Amino acid sequence: MCPAPGPASGPAPAPPAIRAVGLRKAYRDVEVLRGLDLTVPRGAVHALLGPNGAGKTTAVRILATLTEADAGSATVAGHDVRAERSRVRRAISLTGQFAAVDEMQTGAENLRMMARLTPRAGAGTSRSARTGRAAARARAAELLDRFDLSYAADRLVRTYSGGMRRRLDLAASLVGQPEVIFLDEPTTGLDPRSRQELWTVVRDLSAQGTTVFLTTQYLEEADRLADRISVLDGGTLVAEGTADELKRRVADHRLDVVVTEAAYHRLAPQAAHRTPETRTLGFPTGGGAREVRALLDALDPDGTGIERFALHTATLDDVFLTLTRTTPAPAPAPAGQRAEEPSHV
Amino acid sequence: MSEAALSGASEALTMTGRSLRLSRRNVDALITALALPVLLLLIFVYFFGGAIDTGTGTWYVTYVVPGVLLLCAGFGAASTAQAVTEDLKGGIIDRFRSLDIGGTPILAGHVLASTARNLLATSLVFALSFAIGFRPAASPAGWLAAIGLLVAYITALSWLSAAVGLLVRSPEAAGGFTFFISFLPYPSSAFVPTDTMPPWLQGFATCQPVTQVIEAVRGLLLGQPIGATGWVALAWCAGITAVATTAAGLLFRRRVLA
Ligand SMILES: Nc1ncnc2c1ncn2[C@@H]1O[C@H](COP(=O)(O)OP(=O)(O)O)[C@@H](O)[C@H]1O
Ligand SMILES: [Mg+2]
């Protein structure tokens, strides 16, 4: 059977898990990626964060060898995505935005099929070494168990819940024990509990030494899972760093003020956050007493507009909105996904 | 055999298993695929058969069995297009490709499954036609040749259908192809001899591939000499297969590499 994946032992010459330089891609005259640079060290969890239409899926598909870039180069697991496509494919797995399992097969059948199609671990680059029947069966059982799906192994996937389907999809991508896994918006459309379960799975994978590259529109997700975050907007990276670095880059704190009706309309255009229902506006600030006082004075010179205020540590939301604000209006997040209405000035 | 070919063959087998499981569970389509041949056979023999004089001096069932077989083969093969469009809708093709599996094994799986489905329908038609009086006079070699030709015809149409599945954007559009393919056997010698047709139609009906295949299969089953018809029919099938596999390869690359 396949050896359990683990951190590479011994001295690793270790090129980074992913390195991309100047990736460009256009569909017709629409430039989707305009020079993307990325470096992801081995074993890291990296998030590519961006609004809908930013080019996340395009970037993942290029790195996973499913689409060719117009310009630029990339290596994944040390292999060139263009010249060594098969080697890259051997080292990676992709779980895309759309489920890649058959509705009309059972969970076990799906996994056995994927296992049969996967090269035997340790088979090197030999193409004929697909996994045998018995080994495929064992591998499927193991994965079903690991993803808490054994109880539904013999049910058609059609009867699975969204969360179960996503777990099966991820399980199917792991049959070959990839070094680098790509997850394209893994929790979009999942309920909060399923999302938590998926996060646990990602952390487990990472703990075992697998490099995880995930895309997300959810800042919270990037914050919780990723070692580093690249913020993609309009086809280029607008920021990169750890969650804390990004937060520091913009402003440490956010001042939320509850204002009168009249002041709301006057101040709303300048605010980083707006919650019309409670007439609350948020403004970035360093958080020092002097700075906050000056900000309050500037917002409300005659002292009649602001009813209450509160100071918060900046969230990644603030960072994201600040960073993606300059580019022409990215599509707003679907209603209900954010507690606060983002402002695109 | 080279290593790559071996691995391609094993992938195609796994894909065939998949397609067969999927078609076994698509109960509506399966019932249609099996009931249609039976109904058509009964309709042609009992509703129309009495009124049709084929000039061959045999009971109509003997004349019409090859026609019903081909009609249903066309219908069954065309469902390949739907299977391919279904695959393209979801993420499964990307998953297969990220396992480094090429388009050929994926499509070949659908084609082989289609052939298997059709052979099941074919056996059903043979069994029923025996029951109602079909008495072929073929030698074992003739049987083998007739079935081989049927398989070649089904394979050709299934590949054509796979290419159509890669070309169209929806299962509904793929359904339109089914209609077209099912219609082809009517202007042929499947149900009536072509010399009973108006002259403008006769030319097409006599030369079109369905007629060639039917004449060859009919001749083989009845133990009659078929001359070069068998080779002409086989050449048609090989030609269609060659064009369709090439087109499918190009279309697959165009669809998935975007
Ligand atoms: N195959 C394609 N053909 C044409 N346009 C495409 C194609 N794929 C993506 N696009 C366009 O590229 C842009 C970025 O898409 P995508 O990479 O899917 O963004 P994201 O995953 O961040 O939402 C979108 O405007 C989208 O319409
Ligand atoms: Mg996307």
Image: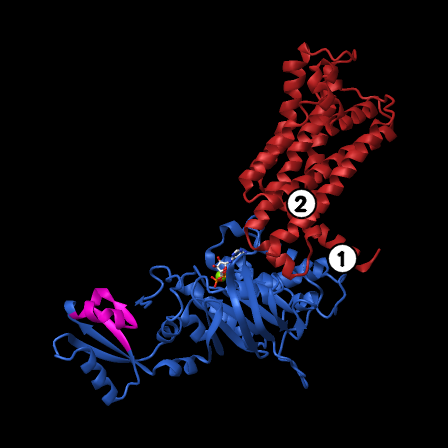
Chain colours: A blue, B red
- Residue A226 seen anywhere in this rendered image of the structure: no
x%, y% of residue A295? 23, 82
What is the total number of numbered labels drawn onto the structure image?
2
Most foreground residue, B212 or A232: A232
Residue at 85% of width from left, 28% of height from top? B142
Height in image: B193 above or below A142? above
Q: Are marks 2 and 1 on the same chain?
A: yes
- The residue wearing badge 2 is B110
Q: Name the quadrant of the C terminus of chain A.
A: bottom left
- The three-letter code of the residue at mark 2 reads His
Q: Residue at x 49, y 71 (%)?
A: A236
The one nearer the camera, A241 or B224, is A241
Q: Quadrant of the N terminus of chain A?
A: bottom right
Side (left or right) of A311 relative to B97? left
Residue holding disc 1:
B7
Judge: label 2 CB < 8 Å from ligand 1. Answer: no
Determine crowd level at label 2: few under 14, some 14-19, many 20+ residues with C-alpha closer than 10 A.
many
When the figure is inspected, residue A170 is found, relative to residue A302, above or below; the finding is: above
Binning the other alpha carbons within 10 Å of mark 1 as few (below 14), some (14 to 19) or many (20 upward) gives many
Instruction: Name which quarter of the figure residue A294 lies in.
Output: bottom left
User: Do labels 2 and 1 touch, CB within 8 Å?
Assistant: no
Residue B136 shown left or right of residue A311 in the figure? right
Task: Please give the range of residues in magenta.
Answer: A263-283
Q: Label 1 is placed on what type of residue?
A: Ser
